[in-house]
Amino acid sequence: WNGTKWIQQCPSGEPFVPHYDPYCDENDQVCKDLKTDFTAIVLCDVDRIVAVSGTATATEVKITMKPVTGGVFYMGVQCDEPAKPNYESGNLLCNVLELYPGINTVHKVALNSFYMSKTEITQKQFKTVMGIENTDPAWNSTIGIGDDYPAYNVSWYDAIAFCNKLSILEGRDICYTVEGLTSKADWESLTYNAIPKESSSKWDAAVPDRNANGYRLPTEAEWEYAARGGQKNKYTRTLGTSGNYCLYSGNNDINDIGKVAWYNKNNSPTFGAKPVATKLPNELGLYDMSGNIFEWCWDWYGAYHDCCVNNPDDPEGKYSYLGPIRVNRGGHYGSAESYYRVSYRSSYTPYTRNTNIGFRVAASE
């Protein structure tokens, strides 16, 4: 075991800064338990901008993808973490919830490098990629409507359809297949109104292509790692050490969350979502990872792994403690402070379209 290895992947002439895993070394038994020499590609700190025109209109939209160099981190709620809601109280590291053991187990995770969209997908981006002209996805002036507002009232089904359609528009592989929707042509012809509005066993059984180069939802582990700032996280506190927790994305001050998040105490004079990127970003240049609206992740909601995993998803399979529900993260415009913590987990049924849920996209390359 030689600890985490980094591979340089930078175009000639561009700056390369070596990164070192702050958690993994040859004496770290937990890293040894991963049973592999984990290798991560160091991504240059260069944005990738996606510019596509919609299928229904000539409107062009741009989506900025931020590089996230992979690594190893502690995922989950640490027992003395401030700002926990009451139901997360407890003193057992791996069984924070007596009723649902393992739901917030602190565990070590190794992730490959990936890209994450700089902001939540906006209403303009959503309508353009989905080919929506006159259909109203139930956006309204009460919650927030406009090109730069996040697309809310988006189900998990809607989100994976968007990912595939975006991939097709950019000439990339599709990441998801659903029974009856297995080719690019199938997804290209799929209309917004044809996406199920109620529970669908076919859509629940969507299959990801781990090797596809297209757009996808982040896994829950990728989302938390990116929210914490990845290798650039300046608030890291590991088990058994002193230091500052990364409470919120880009900020660890419980009394000053308003710098990085729209939440229930600064959401005025109008209540609802706000245009994206109007608060400060985190260390990776990602906006609104805490606050504004919840964001869908790929995973089913279930118990975490007990210890150490490489690139995890679907922690418990389809039927978790609460039924067939998918993870969402980040809190929303009406939540209290505790819901914006980078470790906080939430969930909804995948067909739910709610005024406080949207998403952002990820890509493996």
Image (cartoon, grey):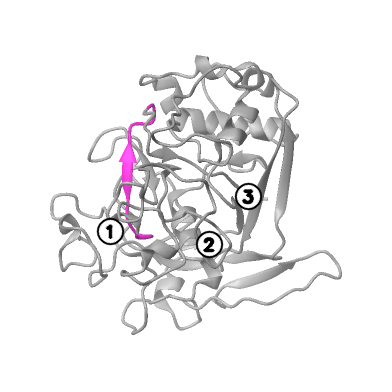
Q: Is residue 353 above or below residue 45?
A: above
Q: Calculate the distance from the C-alpha at mark 1 to the C-alpha at mark 2.
A: 19 Å
Q: Is residue 264 left or right of residue 299?
A: left
265 w.r.t. 316: above or below: below
Q: Which of marks 3 and 1 is nearer the N terminus?
A: 1
Q: Are marks 3 and 2 in contact (CB under 8 Å)?
A: no
Position above or below: 165 against 81: above
Q: Position of residue 168 (x, y in %)?
A: 70, 30
Q: Which mark is residue 338?
A: 1
Q: Residue 349 in magenta?
A: yes
What residue is at 41 percent from the left and 45 percent from the top? 293
The answer to whether residue 176 is seen in the rendering is no
What residue type is disc 2 on? Answer: Pro
The residue that label 3 is drawn on is: 364
Where residue 26 appears, x then y in whole percent?
A: 50, 81
Quadrant position of the N terminus in the picture: bottom right
Q: Mark 2, residues whose alpha carbon is within 10 Å: few (<14), some, or many (≥20)?
A: many
* Distance from the alpha carbon under mark 3 to that under mark 2: 22 Å
The magenta segment: 341-351
Of the numbered discs 3 and 2, the one sitting upstream in the chain is: 2
Residue at 20% from the left image edge and 53% from the top image edge: 101
Give the structural element (helix, strand or loop) at label 1. helix
**Tag 2 residue:** 281
Q: Which residue lies furthest to the right in this view?
A: 13
Question: Which of 74/32 is in front?
Answer: 74
User: In this rendering, does residue 342 appear at all?
Assistant: yes
Return the x and y of residue 200 as percentages of the image width and height: 39, 20
**Residue 340: which quarter of the image?**
bottom left
Q: Which of 140 and 319 is in front in this view?
A: 140
Query: In this view, which residue lies farthest toward the front?
Result: 269
